[in-house]
Image (cartoon, helix red, strand yellow):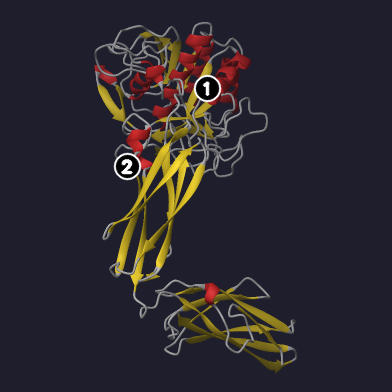
Amino acid sequence: MGTLQNSYARIDGTDERVDVDIAIIDTGINLTHPDLNVVSSTNCARSIGGCKNGQGNDGNGHGSHVAGIAAAIDNDIGVVGVAPGARLWAVKVLNDSGSGYLSWIIKGIDWVTARAGTIEVASMSLAWKGYSSAAHTAIKNSVAKGVVYFAAAGNDAGDIYGADGTFGTSDDVCPAAFPEVAAASALVDTNGTWGGGGPASEYGVDDSFALFSNFSRSVVLGNPVTSPGNAIDLMCPGVNIYSTYKNGGYATYSGTSMASPHAAGLAALNIAEHGRASSAAGVYAIRQALIDGGVDQSSPFGLATTNDSDGSPERLGWAGAVVPVIDIALSEISAPSPVIQGEDVPIEVTVRNAGTKDVSSVIWVSLRDELDDEVGRQGIDGLAKGASTRLTFSWETSSTALGDHTLTAILTNGLEIGDTVQANNTQSVRVTVTDETTPTSVHIADLDGEGTHFGFGLWLATVTVTVRDNMEQLAEGATVSGVFSDGSTLFECTTNESGTCFVEGWQLWLSCLTFTVTDVVVSLPYKPEDNGDPEGDSDGTSITVCRP
């Protein structure tokens, strides 16, 4: 997240605390934890009466974990938060089992609003299902006083507006769905840096969108900020996060609950540098600054695996300066398969400068066969940032062994040119080499049609299909699929030992029907470009049959 480069975080082992106040609206905070700077607390998780000040201790651990992510002290113990040593306000709205009532949560929000002259940021790592006008009003009142709210997007792998995709309904994930709240989704980061080089987790590979995280396919009209993630402001780390815990301890948790305090800590750093908000407009300015200062998922600092499937890729929260980096990626490799031994096979490799800095040095790429060693080596005379080029290698196979070969393209001088992301320096493709007597594909060898009239306009179109391989041998067991021109119903048949099968289509109103083959499935690949008809009554792919 770039916090090590942030001059206001000052993470250097010296206890220099960020001068910002953050409310943790959760299960409370371990009030005496040596790694947390808790300055006030209250217990709103009470069925009778209002919030009870001085009683916000955490018997669950969740709130303490959240607090440490946002603001654990930069000392010689435990962990360090995003905004080290920021003053923490424990607002207990959930009981020690982690559950509670919406009325408790609203009381906690109102308690923060009453202290908005001091509290600048609030993190809500909690959620409930269904829109609540009372809770929404409480949030709006608090934001109007200048408190920046962050909330966990939720862990249902669904839309924060619910299945109906509409805000203000019974399936909203709140408070994340409220436009006045900055929602945070979760990413997997197992090694603390970019590039995807860390081990995989149960929730996804390193530097990827967490499989459990909610997302946003749309955003309400008039949303107060503009994010490429629609109703999600930022994506932040949320998998296997080690942080403070109850009873002075430490623990590892996963969830968007862990992402929200990361984002809250970023807001605290922004406020430490630029000052707090005093109105809703100021709150939205801070949120927009964090969005604009984030890094794109496709950037070198972003996701190594871009699997945010909603088509709205929110930026990753970022606190530091984006230092120009070199990242030469072998983004694609392609080759025909199978091929006949003796052919010169073209292998295409796409090379892209995925970094943020132009490369003027020669970029060397080698192509190797796991069985027969090096195929070739080519150089590129530099590559501008964002640019791509395609290399074509010729693989001469006259002495190549029959069977499967794995061809791998390798960036061979990545270290010399300063490449910072090694995870994308190779690409592989599998190619099967056969001899001339081995079939490599199938095609339609003949289409014949016949119309049979049954009277009163009713007639039957029968199409007989013949399938052969490229050695002109009849192909048995091939499943042929296609459609007649009077509808979209898929018709199928499977070829017999003679390589033939037939499909039938009934018709009453039309005088002619056209049948078009859409696919042939068998053990060999289907090559429609080889389709033909020796009799000339079709093109091998489509045939028209008329009522006699």
Residue at mark 1: 290
Between 39 and 44, the one nearer to me in the picture: 39
Q: Residues within 10 Å of mark 2 (few under 14, many from 20)?
A: few
Q: Quadrant of the C terminus?
A: bottom right
Give left or right: position of 221 versus 335. Answer: right
User: Could you tell me which residue is drawn at 63 percent across and 28 percent down?
Assistant: 223
Q: Quadrant of the N terminus?
A: top left
Mark nearer the N terminus (2 vs 1): 2
For badge 2, the amino acid type reads Glu
Residue assigned mark 2: 202
Question: Can residue 210 be seen in this snapshot?
Answer: no
Q: CA distance from mark 2 to mark 1?
A: 29 Å
Provide residue 388's location: percent of width, then percent of height: 50, 44
372 to 415, vertically: above or below: below
Label 1 crowd bin: few (<14), some (14–19), many (20+), radius 10 Å: many
Q: Position of residue 169 (x, y in %)?
A: 60, 37
Q: Residue at x 45, y 10 (%)?
A: 21
Residue 239 vertical position relative to residue 120 in the rendered view, above or below: below
